[in-house]
């Protein structure tokens, strides 16, 4: 399913008034469940809250609800806010987006506020389960614990020959807690950008993001400053029936505080009427880089295979069922994640 699904959401939006400005409300929801098939198996699917599935049937881990409000302030300015409540956080609602957009020209938009960083192919609708074939994007790749920042960004649409293109750039700051180590990380000066290209049934995307002076604090230890870089690339083919996407990311640092990470997946699907069978292979790999013995001597490596089926049983609703087999390819590591078999399902709707 292509990102133009936001157009469907817009078509379903309800106007709330005709006062000084017009406002639209969009919403989407995922009701999901799942369980691992082994008594001692656990599979983490949320890198922020360490939400996971085990052998008990769980209906909270992947479930979420979101409301997005878009208000037209004037002919060139809009205000956007998106609130998300996740089952893995007991549905505590938080503002995922809150920004102003100014249409400087027909080709250039400038935004300011709380923004989504353009890290991944699916960043702009990461929570919108209706927008992709899986119950969730591959966790081997989509495992960054910060995805938003407070700052400014700009999007510029143009053409390169027969290619339609969009260049995006941003700058700002954010912070978060690494859920695995408990370290507090401040990204004091974040900057980056992405380039999207599309022609006929092909689309390509690249992203480069860097924080030159990130600060990490772990327990009572002194704070460390370090640079970190996140790079991603993706390619997609979609002729309306057959589609395939491949995405690669790397998280690199020039110090020895954390291991470098290399993640990737490739997915293939085929639409047959309202049914979409699909298959995905994904991999997570760490490169020994840390002076911390707990990390340096125990890099994690694992891979997974997913088979799934999506059924679009209504114009704005889809049922998904999938089976994921994860294999730990470095089981001797003290940080090994272990093998796991996960059966999960979801109903995704937009309204």
Image (cartoon, helix red, strand yellow):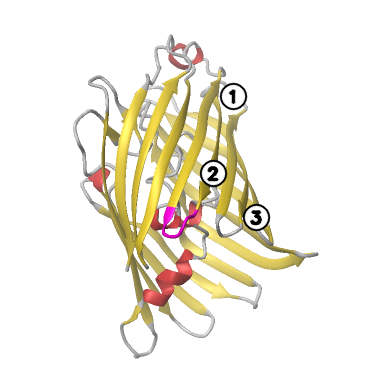
Q: Are marks 3 and 2 in contact (CB under 8 Å)?
A: no
Q: Is residue 139 above or below residue 351?
A: above
Of circles 3 and 2, the one toward us is 2
Q: Quadrant of the C terminus?
A: bottom left
Left or right, 163 with reference to 137: right
- SS category of the residue bearing label 1: loop
Residue hosting label 1: 255
Q: Residue at x 74, y 67 (%)?
A: 159
Q: Residue furthest bottom?
A: 19
The residues bearing labels 2 and 1 have C-alpha atoms spaced at a distance of 37 Å
Q: Position of residue 167 (x, y in %)?
A: 66, 59
Q: Earlier in the sequence, mark 3 or mark 2?
A: 3
* Residue beneath the point at 59% across and 24% down: 255
Q: Which residues are magenta?
A: 271-275
Q: Name the one closer to the observer, 231 or 127.
A: 127
- The answer to which quarter of the image holds residue 15 is bottom left
Residues at marks 3 and 2, CA–CA distance in whole angstroms: 15 Å
Q: CA distance from mark 1 to mark 3?
A: 35 Å
Q: Main secondary structure of the magenta part?
A: loop
Identify the secondary structure beneath mark 2.
strand
Contact (Cβ within 8 Å) of mark 1 with mark 3: no
Q: Which residue is mark 3?
A: 203
Q: Position of residue 250 (x, y in %)?
A: 59, 34
Residue pictured at 47% horizontal, 20% vertical: 300
Mark 1 residue crowding within 10 angstroms, few (<14) / some (14–19) / many (20+) = some
């Amino acid at each position: 399913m292509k990102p133009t699904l936001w157009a469907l959401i817009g078509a379903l939006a309800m106007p709330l008034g005709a006062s000084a400005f017009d406002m639209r409300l969009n919403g989407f929801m995922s009701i999901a469940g799942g369980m691992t098939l082994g008594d001692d198996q656990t599979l983490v699917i949320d890198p922020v809250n360490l939400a996971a599935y085990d052998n008990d049937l769980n209906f909270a881990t992947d479930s979420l609800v979101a409301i997005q409000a878009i208000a037209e302030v004037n002919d060139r300015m809009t205000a956007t806010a998106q609130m998300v409540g996740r089952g893995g956080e007991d549905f505590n609602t938080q503002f995922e987006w809150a920004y102003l957009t100014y249409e400087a020209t027909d080709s250039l938009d400038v935004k300011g506020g709380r923004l989504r960083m353009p890290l991944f192919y699916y960043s702009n609708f990461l929570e919108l389960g209706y927008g992709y074939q899986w119950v969730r994007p591959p966790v081997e790749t989509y495992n960054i614990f910060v995805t938003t920042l407070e700052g400014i960004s700009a999007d510029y649409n143009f053409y390169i020959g027969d290619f339609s293109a969009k260049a995006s750039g941003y700058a700002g700051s954010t912070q978060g807690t690494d859920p695995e180590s408990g370290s507090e990380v401040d990204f004091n000066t974040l900057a980056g950008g992405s380039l999207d290209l599309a022609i006929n049934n092909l689309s390509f995307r690249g992203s480069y993001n860097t924080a030159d002076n990130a600060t990490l604090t772990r327990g009572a230890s002194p704070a460390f400053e370090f640079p970190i870089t996140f790079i991603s690339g993706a390619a997609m083919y979609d002729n309306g029936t057959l589609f395939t996407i491949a995405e690669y990311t790397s998280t690199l640092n020039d110090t020895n505080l954390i291991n470098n990470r290399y993640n990737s997946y490739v997915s293939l699907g085929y639409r047959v009427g309202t049914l979409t069978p699909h298959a995905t292979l994904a991999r997570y790999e760490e490169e020994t880089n840390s002076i911390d013995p707990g990390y340096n001597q125990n890099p994690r490596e694992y891979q997974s295979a997913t088979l799934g089926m999506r059924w679009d049983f209504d114009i704005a609703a889809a049922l998904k069922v999938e089976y994921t087999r994860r294999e730990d390819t470095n089981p001797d590591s003290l940080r090994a994640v272990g093998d796991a078999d996960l059966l999960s399902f979801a109903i995704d709707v937009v309204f």
